[in-house]
Amino acid sequence: MKSLAKKSPSANSVFLKQAMTQPKTTGGIRPSSQALARRMVEVLELDQQWVVELGPGTGVFTEELLAQGQPPERLMLLEANAAFVCLLRERFPKVNVVLGDARELPQLLTLVGPKKIGKLISGLPFRNFPKNLGSDITAAIGSVLNEGGIAVQFTYALQPPFPAQAAALAKLTGRRKNLVLGNMPPAFVWRYEKLP
């Protein structure tokens, strides 16, 4: 399938600069690998409905979502870093790119259309966040997912990425699906489902 993303030779340099200046929110020293992106999107089980991507960074997961058939007009990228937002808007001109805080997901989602969604994918570094921030974002995710909706998140740790108590309160139940050795560092992919 033809890529819907514009190639940007500056993506790696933008990521490196942000990793050096904002390491806690960037979450790594290099973008996620294509191998991790492929596994994340496979676990998400695309079905043409709206998808929200949190913390898209340079757009590695975004590119895979589009390559696997996600309609760009039904894709929202929510990014808090203005430098990444500029890059994403350049790379993915047909995708809804929103500058904002993931804690405000319910309000920001209505700017592009739906109030609820069935699919969410996240590259946010939950393990780098203070516990209250991770809990607030988890609550926001739970509030926008339909019953039976799926959220996919990766982590470098053995423990679940979402804070356990916050996930329970948000009615999100998760399990580890894969270990992606082709990422540096190796990453665990988790799939969460919204309970009734």
Image (cartoon, rainbow, N blue to C red):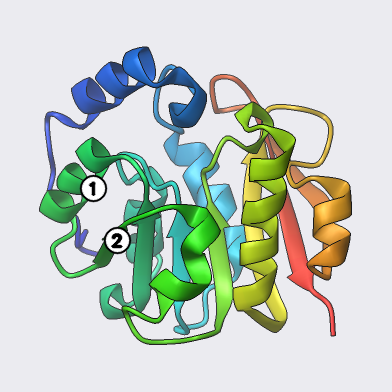
Write the residue at 13% across / 43% down.
Answer: 7
Question: Where does residue 154 sit, x and y in percent of width and height?
Answer: 64, 42
Determine crowd level at label 2: few under 14, some 14-19, many 20+ residues with C-alpha closer than 10 A: some
Comes first in the chain, label 1 or label 2 = 1
Which residue is labeled 2 in the image? Answer: 98
Question: Where does residue 159 sit, x and y in percent of width and height?
Answer: 84, 34
Question: Where does residue 18 sit, x and y in percent of width and height?
Answer: 31, 23
Write the residue at 17% across / 70% down.
Answer: 94
Write the residue at 45% across / 80% down.
Answer: 50
Q: Nearer the viewer, residue 103 or 125?
A: 103
The secondary structure type at the circle numbered 2 is: strand
- Quarter of the figure with residue 193: bottom right
Determine crowd level at label 1: few under 14, some 14-19, many 20+ residues with C-alpha closer than 10 A: many
Q: Is residue 60 left or right of residue 145?
A: left
Q: Is residue 118 above or below residue 99?
A: below
The N terminus lies in which quarter of the figure?
bottom left
The C terminus lies in which quarter of the figure?
bottom right
Q: Residue furthest front?
A: 132
Contact between marks 1 and 2 (CB within 8 A): the answer is yes
Question: Where does residue 126 sit, x and y in percent of width and height?
Answer: 64, 38
Kind of residue sitting beneath label 2? Val
Write the residue at 71% across / 42% down.
Answer: 132
Count of numbered circles in the view: 2
Q: Nearer the viewer, residue 46 or 127?
A: 127
The secondary structure type at the circle numbered 1 is: helix
Residue 189 seen from this side: no
Kind of residue sitting beneath label 1? Val
Q: Which mark is residue 85?
A: 1
Q: Is residue 92 left or right of residue 190?
A: left
Query: Residues under labels 1 and 2: Cα distance?
Result: 7 Å
Residue 14 seen from this side: yes
